[in-house]
Each structure stands twice: as C-alpha cells, then as structure tokens.
Amino acid sequence: PPSDDFQREDFDIYTESSVSVYDAILGTSIKVKTIDGDCEIKVPAGTQPETRLRIRGRGVPRLGKPKERGDHYITVKVMVPRNLSSDDERRVKELRDASVA
C-alpha cells in the first residue's frame, strides 16, 4: 500500500523533512527515508523554507529498465521557534542587529 510519507509522480518520489531555523542558517545533515531505506543528505547553509533538494536515482525503477530510476525530491520545512526564552530572544536580536543584510 502507498505510504503517506511518500508522494509519487511518474518515476519520482516526493517527501518533506523539517529542520530548525538554526540548522537552515548554518547547514546540517539529515536522515531521509527513501524507498530503499534511510539516506543521509546535506542541507546547505542558508537553505530557505520550501527549498527542494534532490537525490538522483533514488526514485521508482522504470518498468523493464531497472537500472533507470526516477529521483527523490525532499522539500525542506524550516521550523521557526514560537516561544523563545528571554535569553534566546536577546541573542537573536543581537544577531539581527549585527547583520548588515
């Protein structure tokens, strides 16, 4: 039966993964479920919400051509904290005020 974790479009697979706002800023590695099992991928520093990352060749095998496969796409969901401690809020404001952008 199809999984709620995976969306399929032709030979490609689509999933979502969440990272913290801090990991989106600094970059990180995350473990992603694929149809072949877990795979670790890099989330580059500065990743924006809804960025789509691709793992080539980890989609669905083509009928009659098992060596040809679609890709696996991961949409990155960035989790922004709703409740900061006063200490964390002060640090975030310092970062904001120090940034030039």
Image (cartoon, grey):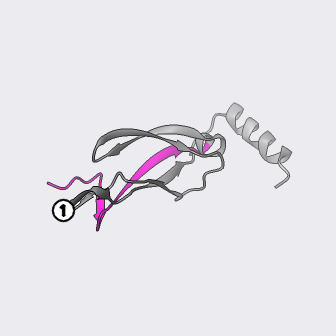
Left or right for 47, reference 37: right
> For this rendering, which residue is in front, 36 or 90?
36
Q: Quadrant of the N terminus?
A: bottom left
What kind of element bears circle 1?
A: loop
Within 10 angstroms of label 1, few (less than 14), some, or many (20 or more) residues?
Answer: few
Q: Residue at x 60, y 46 (%)?
A: 44
Q: On the image, numbered disc 1 is attached to which residue?
A: 64
- Residue 29 location (% of width, % of height): 52, 37
What are the residue bounds of the magenta stretch? Answer: 1-21
* Residue drawn at the location 30% of the way across and 60% of the way down: 7
Residue depicted at 85% across the width and 52% down the height: 100
- Asked where in the image residue 38 lies, by quadrant, the reply is top left
Amino acid type shown at disc 1: Gly
Q: Specify the farthest residue to the top.
A: 87
* Above or below: residue 87 compared with residue 4: above
Question: How far from the left and from the top, in percent, is residue 96?
Answer: 78, 47
- Depth check: 34 or 98 in front? 34
17 is within the stretch colored magenta: yes
Q: Quick one: which residue is furthest to the left in this view?
A: 1
Quadrant for residue 20, please give it. Answer: top right
Instruction: Please identify the quadrant where the C terminus is shown.
Output: bottom right
Residue at left 41%, top 53%? 16
Check residue 20 for magenta coloring.
yes
Residue 19, placed above or below residue 7: above
